Amino acid sequence: SAALALESQARQVICQLNLLDAQALQLHQGLEKRLTIAMAPELQTGPWSQPLHALAQAFPGLEVEVRSASQREAIRLLHDGTVQLALVFERPGIDERESFLEAGSQLLVAVASPRHPAGMQGALPLPEETFAEQRQIIVASGNPTGSDPRMVLSRRIWLTDSYLATLELVHSGLGWAYLPQPLVEPLIASGALAEVRFDNMASRLRLWVDIIWIKPRPLGLGARHYLDSVRKLFEKDPPRA
């Protein structure tokens, strides 16, 4: 029995040594110790976390940090070297210091509580002047300009630092918000939320998504693996117009 116990311990030690050897080889081949990704809050519900499963299987010893950051903050963190990759909505201009990978799109839906004037059943579509005065709740800690300007429609703004907080405020009837379709579709179907209707624009906003990194900074093995997985995930999508 003592011999069997020693044999079991020896197998565990060998397994640990093999794991350390694999990690040392990966580090030698360029595996970063930690991969940090900044992600716009609107993108935390969607397919962009799927490639992390493959990454975890390929490199079990790699530390991964996913940071929630507004569009502007994510770009700042990327340029100051705090993060290696940033998932953001497509921007109108091009920064020559950056490389990017097209990564699908996110559908945002304007929603409110059924008790809110904008979400009441049978309510007429809101004219521009009316919804501009309805309180909009935005995930953009500190400053609404941190969000994509296409999502800021109201003059009256409340800010949160998470989509759970935004969802709670909207559900309480304190305002309306653009929220990711995968998050709100079941709540609309159950009647917990209602889709807001505008009279001069669609209540659903589809925005293209990019993953950005800095050209002069070589990406580690983990970051490259994540990008390859994202590329395969969206390779059959139609090209952007």
Image (spheres, rainbow, N blue to C red):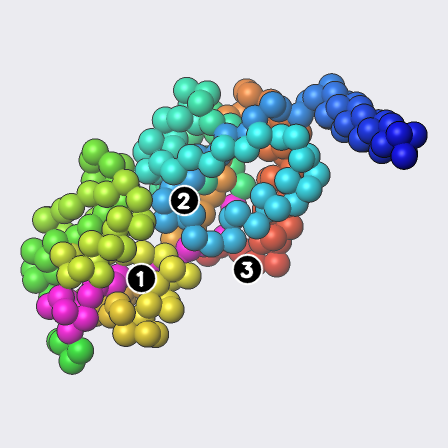
- What is the residue that sits farthest to the bottom in this orientation? 122
Instruction: From the viewer's perspective, tell me whether residue 103 is left or right of residue 207.
Output: right
> Which residue is under mark 1?
109
32 over 157 or under it: above or below: above
Q: Judge whether residue 32 can be spotted in this image.
A: yes
Dot 1 lies on which element? strand
Q: Earlier in the sequence, mark 2 or mark 1?
A: 2
Is label 2 in contact with label 3 (beta carbons under 8 Å)?
no
Q: Amino acid at mark 2?
A: Glu
Mark 3 and mark 1: span between their CA atoms?
A: 22 Å
Instruction: From the viewer's perspective, tell me whether residue 197 is left or right of residue 59.
Output: left
Is label 3 in contact with label 1 (beta carbons under 8 Å)?
no
Label of residue 72 in the image? none
Dot 3 lies on which element? loop
Viewer-proximal residue among 1 and 237 = 1
Mark 2 and mark 1: span between their CA atoms?
A: 18 Å
> Which residue is under mark 2?
90
The magenta span reads 102-120
Dot 2 lies on which element? loop
Q: Residue at coordinates 60% horizontally, 23% vertically from top-left?
A: 33
